[in-house]
Amino acid sequence: MYVVLAILMVVVVLASVILNIMMNQSRHTRHQVSRIKAYYAGQACMVYTLEMLRTKAWVPNAASGAVKYACMGTCVGVTPSYTIPVDPEIPYNVRVTINPLGSGISGTTKLDILTEYAYTGPTQ
């Protein structure tokens, strides 16, 4: 009887350890997926901004120090000059800072991309 109880206790402890490891891995995987989606949302908005600048639909400021902002979603703390169309598949706010002409390499326009995301998955 004691042997059966001891084996049962060992099995229960091992099962709980394995379950805990699986839950932590699942949480980590969801966080990684959220982070990767935010990264590619920033990439997509950068490509969209480059296309708008290339086709001259958007024009950066020529004045030194004067930046323009392009936003997808809510642009916190700044007033957007341009709006990036919202994609329902991308649940993140993305802000593109379009710096003045000549601020980048060899007189180009420098772009800064900020993707705001927070992991909101279950904690336990």
Image (cartoon, helix red, strand yellow):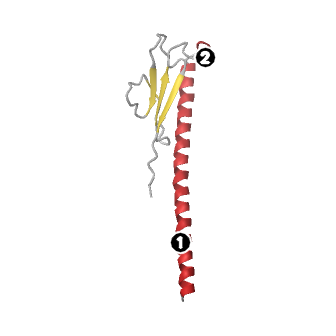
Foreground residue, 12 or 70? 12
Residue 12 in percent (x, y) is at 53, 74
Q: How far apart are marks 1 and 2 (CA)?
A: 60 Å
Q: Quadrant of the C terminus?
A: bottom left
Please say if 114 is above or below 12: above
Q: Earlier in the sequence, mark 1 or mark 2?
A: 1
Kind of residue at disc 1: Val
The numbered disc on residue 13 is: 1
Which residue is found at the position 52% from the left and 51% from the top? 30
Foreground residue, 110 or 8? 8
Q: Nearer the viewer, mark 1 or mark 2?
A: 1
Residue 16 in percent (x, y) is at 52, 68
Assign a secondary structure to mark 2: helix
Which residue is found at the position 38% from the left and 31% from the top? 76
Q: Say which quarter of the image contains residue 54.
A: top right
Q: Which residue lies furthest to the right in this view?
A: 106
Q: Which residue lies furthest to the top in this view?
A: 63
Kind of residue at disc 2: Ile
Please rate how many residues cluster around mark 1, counting C-alpha atoms within 10 Å: few if below 14, some from 14 to 19, many from 20. Answer: few
Residue hosting label 2:
105
Q: Is residue 77 left or right of residue 40?
A: left
Q: Say which quarter of the image contains residue 83.
A: top left
Please say if 113 is above or below 26: above
Q: In which quarter of the image is the N terminus?
A: bottom right
Assign a secondary structure to mark 1: helix
Please say if 55 is above or below 91: above
Please rate how many residues cluster around mark 2, counting C-alpha atoms within 10 Å: few if below 14, some from 14 to 19, many from 20. Answer: few
Residue 58 in percent (x, y) is at 50, 19
Please say if 88 is above or below 48: below
Which residue is found at the position 46% from the left and 26% from the top? 70
